[in-house]
Image (cartoon, rainbow, N blue to C red):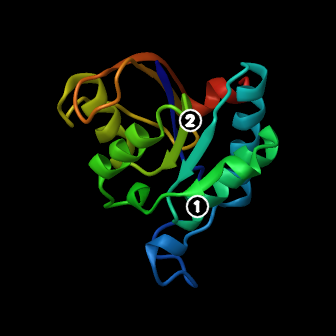
Amino acid sequence: MTTLYVLRHGVAVERGADGYRDDSERPLTPDGEKKVRQAAKALRRLEVEFDLLLTSPFARALRTAQIVAQVFGAKRKLEVCDDLAAGGDPEAVVRQLQRRHKSAESVMLVGHEPYLSELVSMLLTGHPGLPLNLKKSGLCKLTITRVRYGRCATLEWLLTPRVLSGR
């Protein structure tokens, strides 16, 4: 059994903002960092655990993952996964999870929309079209009996940033 946590990056600087030529460079806003830290602390209180933390290389997702790793004291578990970037290959992410299944029974993925919702939809239904709204700093938990690209998961819960912040 594999537990998969899927976390969307926190609130970032708006697309097209001065100083950020490329979408991949957009950082979290100060409020975005604060909300990610609140969410990470809430996850600690919920006793969430992970063996591996895979993140998109884009600045906002990487910083989100770094904050989570810091709160959990898990910096050594953090790895960049190019296939989690916006426009990445979700099948490659699943192959990576398959290879690591024995050593990492609980994995957290940090990335972007609509990529993450499409991946979650594929794992839940076998199709990418499930109408799922993963808010910034929102998180879902899936359990998977046998990791594969297609219907293989059960949704355990989906938490909004508001729930995680205790508001």
Q: Quadrant of residue 150?
A: top left
Determine the residue positioned at 54% across, 80% down.
20
Mark 2 touching mark 1, by CB under 8 A? Answer: no
Q: CA distance from mark 2 to mark 1?
A: 27 Å
Tell me which label, 2 or 1, sits earlier in the chain.
1
Determine the residue positioned at 71% across, 44% down.
68
Q: Is residue 137 above or below residue 120?
A: below
Count of residue discs: 2
38 lies left or right of 92 = right
Instruction: Label 1: state its secondary structure.
Output: helix
Q: Nearer the viewer, mark 2 or mark 1?
A: 2
Q: Is residue 39 above or below residue 25?
A: above
Determine the residue positioned at 73% across, 20% down.
47
**Residue located beneath label 2 in the image:** 103
**Residue 13 place in picture, x, y as percent:** 58, 65
* Amino acid type for the residue under numbered disc 1: Arg
* Amino acid type for the residue under numbered disc 2: Ser
Q: Is disc 1 surrounded by few (<14), some (14 to 19) or many (20+) residues within 10 Å? A: many
- Judging depth in this view, the residue of 153 and 16 nearest the camera is 153
Determine the residue positioned at 38% across, 38% down.
98
**Residue located beneath label 1 in the image:** 60
Instruction: Label 2: state its secondary structure.
Output: loop
139 lies left or right of 145 = right
Q: Is residue 3 above or below residue 33?
A: above
